[in-house]
Amino acid sequence: MRWLRRHQLPVLVVLLVAVTWGALFIVYDYRSPVSQFLKGVGTIQLEGWSAYDLNDICIRLEAGNGTPPITAETADAVALQVYPGRYVREVLLVSFHNTCTGAAPRLAWAVSMSASSASGAPSPTGSVPRAVVILDAQTGQPITAHADRLLAAPSSGY
């Protein structure tokens, strides 16, 4: 223990660096549960999509306020034009944030879709083919659309 008393400062510095590095890993690493929780705070859960999945494709959805001129039924119909033959699982009024460009938030309809009317047939990898279409709530025009590889590409190239 004499050795430890003589080297208290270097041991303290090493421990401080290790604790700081560990804390940074826990908060900033994408695999960390703490990081995933922090990214999901304040977001809207869309059926079939986690906040982390949406963040990977530059989408952040928060609670939307207002009465847009475009209805949920219209958003449903437009989404079916983007991905014809798919099943609409959920339509939500949201505040859409593009996390890659940092553009101003927009009031939008988020439409979650799957491959079939059932819960969807799992792919060989075990995941259910899914798609998400984000539509401007003021104009009804698609802002962005994304689908898993197993679904066809959007009909208009969004």
Image (cartoon, rainbow, N blue to C red):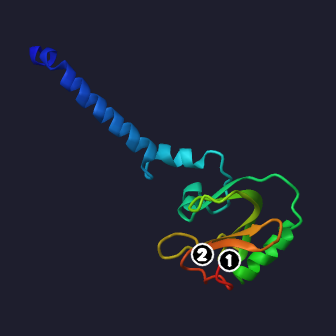
Task: Tell me: 38 left or right of 118.
Answer: left
Q: Position of residue 66 (x, y in %)?
A: 85, 54
Q: Residue at x 49, y 43 (%)?
A: 34
Question: Mark 2: which secondary structure?
Answer: loop
Q: Amino acid at mark 1?
A: Ser
Q: Amino acid at mark 2?
A: Ala
Q: Position of residue 42 (x, y in %)?
A: 66, 46
Q: Is 64 situated above or below 13?
A: below
Q: For the C terminus, which image quadrant?
A: bottom right
**Disc 2: CA contacts within 10 A as few (<14), some (14-19) or many (>=20):** some
Residue with the mark numbered 1: 116
Residue with the mark numbered 2: 121
Q: Residue at x 56, y 49 (%)?
A: 39
**Disc 1: CA contacts within 10 A as few (<14), some (14-19) or many (>=20):** some
50 or 142: which is nearer to us? 142
Q: Residue placed farthest to the bottom in the image?
A: 155
Q: Position of residue 16 (x, y in %)?
A: 30, 29
Q: Are marks 1 and 2 in contact (CB under 8 Å)?
A: yes
Q: Is 103 situated above or below 15?
A: below
69 or 38: which is nearer to us? 69
Q: For the N terminus, which image quadrant?
A: top left
Task: Tell me: 58 left or right of 24.
Answer: right
Q: CA distance from mark 1 to mark 2?
A: 7 Å
Quadrant housing residue 13: top left
Quadrant housing residue 150: bottom right
Question: Mark 1: which secondary structure?
Answer: loop
